[in-house]
């Protein structure tokens, strides 16, 4: 029951912090930060983890979340209007915007968990989100189906909104942890980050070579002063 209660708490915190709408980005980032911590099995307080990440990633989460939300709403409206307009050229536009919306969903699905756990610019976050979504297309589609089922369930039974997003988020976080497992530290064994680089075949590169624009730095890893500081500390060092 303790695990279910934690999922319920995260669901409620996410809903409350999303109410201003503009805070969807920071709230979703904090939700996945706390959920990944929970899935990894560390000794954690979900509410403390949530608000720690919410404060820490507030500005960057806003700058990432607002454009993604605006683009998503725009694409969803275009698909809906094209569908209602009828056949002919509108069918082409409906398919076109639906495909673009699918790629937007891929980006969004990975962007906030990556922002929650890694210290990168929003540009790098989006590039890596797209790369990972295609590289792990099977799990990406499974996460999309899980999310779609959760939204459908909430549409049928609106009361499920208070727990469904938490349960869906837990499943997505579990799959996300399996994707990022080689690079996330083990919270029980206090392991450190292994660099993540693209394309495949770069795993054997030396550490200095891995420090390019596509490498990921984990927020829980202690860095030398010249590296990007980990976001586990309070605030960022210029």
Image (cartoon, grey):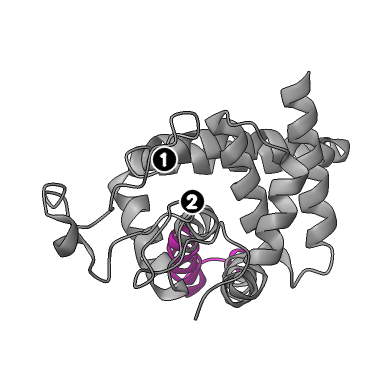
Instruction: Residue under label 2, please give it.
Output: 220
CB contact under 8 Å: marks 1 and 2 = yes
Asked which secondary structure carries label 1, the reply is loop
What residue appears at the point 35 percent right and 59 percent down from the top-left corner? 216
| Membership of 86 in magenta stretch | yes
Give coordinates of residue 133: x percent, y percent: 37, 51
Q: What label does residue 43 carry, if any?
A: none
| Membership of 124 in magenta stretch | no
Q: Is residue 101 above or below residue 172?
A: below
What residue appears at the point 57 percent right and 28 percent down from the top-left corner? 41
Which image quadrant is residue 232 in? bottom right
Q: Is residue 198 left or right of residue 125?
A: left
Give coordinates of residue 80: x percent, y percent: 64, 65
Q: What label does residue 185 carry, if any?
A: 1
Looking at the image, can residue 162 be seen?
A: yes
Q: Where are the magenta residues, as a range?
A: 82-103
Looking at the image, can residue 149 be seen?
A: no
Measured Cα–Cα span from mark 1 to mark 2: 8 Å
């Amino acid at each position: 029951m303790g695990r279910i209660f934690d999922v319920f708490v995260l669901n409620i915190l996410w809903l409350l912090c999303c109410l201003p709408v503009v805070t969807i980005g920071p709230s979703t980032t904090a939700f996945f930060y706390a959920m990944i911590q929970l899935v990894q099995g560390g000794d954690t307080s979900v509410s403390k983890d949530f608000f720690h990440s919410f404060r820490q990633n507030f500005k960057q989460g806003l700058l990432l979340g607002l454009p993604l939300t605006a683009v998503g709403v725009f694409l969803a409206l275009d698909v809906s209007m094209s569908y209602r307009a009828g056949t002919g050229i509108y069918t082409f536009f409906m398919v076109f915007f639906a495909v673009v919306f699918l790629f937007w969903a891929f980006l969004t699905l990975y962007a906030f968990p990556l922002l929650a756990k890694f210290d990168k610019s929003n540009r790098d976050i989006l590039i890596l989100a797209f790369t990972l979504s295609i590289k792990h297309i099977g799990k990406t589609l499974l996460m999309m189906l899980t999310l779609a089922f959760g939204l459908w369930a909430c549409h049928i039974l609106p009361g499920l909104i208070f727990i469904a997003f938490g349960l869906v988020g837990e499943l997505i976080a579990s799959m996300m942890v399996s994707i990022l497992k080689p690079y996330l530290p083990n919270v029980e064994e206090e392991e450190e980050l292994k660099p993540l680089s693209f394309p495949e075949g770069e795993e054997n590169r030396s550490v200095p070579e891995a420090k390019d624009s596509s490498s990921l730095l984990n927020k829980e890893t202690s860095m030398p002063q010249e590296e990007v500081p980990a976001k586990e500390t309070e605030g960022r060092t210029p």
